[in-house]
């Protein structure tokens, strides 16, 4: 993919969130996580996914490499939480890679 | 071939973790190659399950190295495999009709969970049925993995899981 043709981070995040909702009926809603301060991770897509059947309250991010061929030229990270865990977060930030991340806008929902 | 040892010695922790992610992805790739040879030769199911399980574990280890570092990957595998696998399915699923995709995600997760339970170490906590060593059936008579049908394994999903792992592995090889 030509750099000039690369989608913006938010467009890529929306596309990825939509794909995740479409691919798994257990995904209720996907939120974009945003760094609380400019911590050098602004080129990364971090998604918080509210998923039925997720157990426990451990924040367990799973990281993926950029996938320019499929329209995601950014490193992406997925964090699954159960609906109950999401409610208990009550919008509070989470820690990842030693930094604070806030729950941002909803990108896709079932 | 890239020299992982050199790559990991000259830079920091993140690069070292990436080199381990690549290493696990490379080995998973090799497991999948062997598995496909076994598939095409009609080898008994227990051996194919074993290689699929090995490829699955190493793919999850690659994801774990990249996400949480090699040290974490050394200590945790089976407990976190499920936590890794579900996002992996979403990330590497092919675009298709929503109905087809949903069925795939569930079926793939069930198969992954099923083959993990057939790992000897994990099987001890369940029914002892496993893909490697003979075990005692309910009547106490020995059961042979090579002769078992493994009724909880859906063979029709096998090929889909292999394809998904291949896409995952190719991605983690770029770490």
Image (spheres, grey):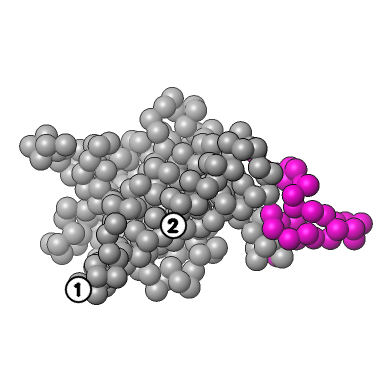
Secondary-structure class at tag 1: loop
Quarter of the image with the C terminus of chain B is bottom left
In this view, A101 is above or below B171: below
Chain letter of the residue carrying label 2: B
Q: Is residue B11 left or right of residue A3?
A: right
Quarter of the image with the N terminus of chain B is bottom left
Q: Is residue A65 left or right of residue B104?
A: left
Disc number at residue A17? none
Secondary-structure class at tag 2: helix
Chain letter of the residue carrying label 1: B
Q: Which one is earlier in the sequence, the residue at label 1 or at label 2?
A: 1
Does the magenta segment cover residue A82? no
Q: Quadrant of residue B141?
A: bottom right
Q: Is residue B126 left or right of residue B106?
A: right
Disc number at residue B27? 2
Query: Main SS type for the magenta part?
Result: loop
Q: Quadrant of residue B143?
A: bottom right
Q: Quadrant of residue A36?
A: bottom left
Per the image, the residue denoted by label 1 is B10
Q: Nearer the viewer, residue A34 or B13?
A: B13
Q: Position of residue A39 (x, y in %)?
A: 15, 64
Question: Which residues lie in the magenta part?
Answer: B125-154
Q: Position of residue B4 (x, y in %)?
A: 29, 65
In this view, B3 is above or below A75: below
Q: CA distance from mark 1 to mark 2?
A: 23 Å
Q: Position of residue B139 (x, y in %)?
A: 92, 57
Q: Position of residue B107 (x, y in %)?
A: 57, 39
Whether residue B110 is visible: no
């Amino acid at each position: 993919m030509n750099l000039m043709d690369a989608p913006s981070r938010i467009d890529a995040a929306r596309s990825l969130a939509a794909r995740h909702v479409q691919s798994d009926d257990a995904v209720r809603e996907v939120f974009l996580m945003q760094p609380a301060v400019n911590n050098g991770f602004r080129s990364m897509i971090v998604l918080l996914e509210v998923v039925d059947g997720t157990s426990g309250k451990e924040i367990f991010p799973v990281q993926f490499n950029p996938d320019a061929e499929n329209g995601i030229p950014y490193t992406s990270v997925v964090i699954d939480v159960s609906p109950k865990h999401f409610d208990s977060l009550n919008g509070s930030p989470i820690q990842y890679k030693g930094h604070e991340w806030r729950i941002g806008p909803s990108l896709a929902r079932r | 071939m890239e020299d992982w040892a050199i790559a990991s010695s000259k830079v920091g922790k993140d690069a070292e973790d990436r080199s381990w992610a690549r290493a696990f992805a490379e080995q998973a790739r090799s497991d999948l190659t062997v598995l496909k040879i076994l598939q095409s030769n009609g080898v008994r199911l227990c051996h194919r399950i074993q290689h699929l399980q090995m490829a699955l574990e190493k793919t999850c280890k690659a994801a774990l190295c990249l996400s949480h570092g090699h040290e974490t990957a050394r200590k945790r595998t089976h407990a976190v495999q499920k936590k890794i696998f579900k996002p992996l399915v979403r990330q590497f699923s092919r675009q298709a009709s929503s109905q087809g995709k949903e069925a795939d995600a569930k079926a793939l997760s069930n198969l992954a969970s099923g083959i993990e339970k057939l790992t000897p170490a994990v099987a001890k906590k369940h029914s002892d049925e496993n893909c490697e060593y003979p075990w005692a059936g309910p009547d106490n008579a020995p059961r042979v993995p090579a002769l078992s049908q493994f009724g909880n394994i859906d063979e029709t999903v096998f090929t889909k899981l292999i394809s998904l792992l291949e896409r995952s592995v190719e991605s983690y090889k770029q770490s």
